[in-house]
Image: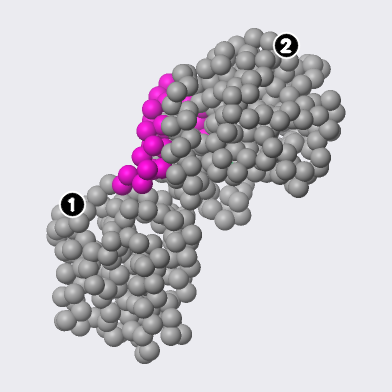
Amino acid sequence: MDQIKLADSIYYLGFNDRRTHLFENMWPIPYGIAYNSYLINDEKVALIDTVEHQFIDDYFEKIDNILHGKKVDYLIVNHMEPDHSGALKAIIGKYPDITVVGNKKTFDLIDNFYQKTEHSMVVDDGTCLNLGKNVLQFQMIPMVHWPETMVTFDETEQILFSGDAFGSFGTLDGGVFDDELNLQFYEEESMRYFTNVVGKYCLQTSNALKKLSSFKIRMIGAAHGPVWRTDLNWILSRYKKWSNYKTDAGVVIVYGSMYGNTEKMAEVIARQLSKNGVKNIRIYDASKTHVSYIISDIFKYKGLIVGAPTYNLGLFPPVNAFLNDIADMKIKDHYLGLFGNYSWSGGAVKKLKCFAEKMKWEMVDAAVEEKSRLKVEKYEQCLHLADAMAAKIL
Ligand code: FEO
């Protein structure tokens, strides 16, 4: 079997998951996902993270083919989420003397999820572990993506094992390293991974990037997606941009519509944005498109315009669910426009305004509220809303 190496004694032990439909049982992964684990075969042997539970048999086979009976001394848990710790119990079962390496929060989680560990090494910022030739240093990056998340830096080889940070959706189809892959494939999938999974923790991600900037990093072994060894700036620059809410000039229009009247308002607004010179316009029907894709585009573009009809005196439920997700993610620095339909009672626009207050984004214009079919006065207001948004973002 082909063994994939990052350096002389450092092996890639990842697996591609093309069966799972929803990551975390929530986010669509039509192009799958890779779970990356790494093995350092030094005087002492260390595993860095494990893989999802379903791959245990093949995972053990890969380890055995490298170690030929030598035991694993350390299991380093950069991140406890089960897509990485799924093989933890089995590894401890196979190597009962193994020392599990993590921080205090890691062990609280291991205890709660699995079992108490018999041999533990509790690390903190700057703690080092000498394996012989390879010296590892640990740094805490809490909330990228859980409170216990940390990274492991191999000082000898200058490789950063980064956990979820710098990861991506999408399997590794043949190639494993960035220079073996067409990165165009990861353009959308890395952004959707970051925005969906870690997007709520932009501040923490930005802090982690600052903290890691003082390390001389030659290679990044993330827990998902490509191993970065040639163009590290490809992924680093994107993470910096996304985590600082840096957006491009463009507008996402998200609407709900039962009988097409609210949808028509969305079309009118989009056409007027285009006439103003806005080229990046994405229109989504909240009843159809999974929020995963919409979130990603909201991180991409500066403007968001939301429209919904009234339903049972309130907001049309698919739009309501969408807005709850956006509010929960606490996305910052956007311009907002609103439109809605009164239907037979009114209520949607009032609720949309509550969202605006909660988000504290700048409203570019007054909310437009129509009663059923779009008529001249509100048509003009839709144009005005589009003009105001275009003026802000261009
Ligand atoms: Fe890849 Fe937060 O788990």
Of mark 1 and mark 2, the one earlier in the sequence is 2
User: Which element is circle 1 on?
Assistant: loop
Q: How many marks?
A: 2
Residue pointed to by mark 1 = 394
Write the residue at 77% across / 30% down: 120
Q: Amino acid at mark 1?
A: Leu
Q: Magenta span covers which residues?
A: 223-247
Is 227 contained in the magenta span?
Answer: yes
Q: Position of residue 321 (x, y in %)?
A: 48, 68
User: Which element is circle 2 on?
Assistant: loop
Write the residue at 61% across / 54% down: 25
Residue pointed to by mark 2 = 43
Name the foreground residue: 338 vs 216: 216
Write the residue at 44% across / 60% down: 326
Q: Amino acid at mark 2?
A: Glu
Q: Position of residue 86 (x, y in %)?
A: 71, 40
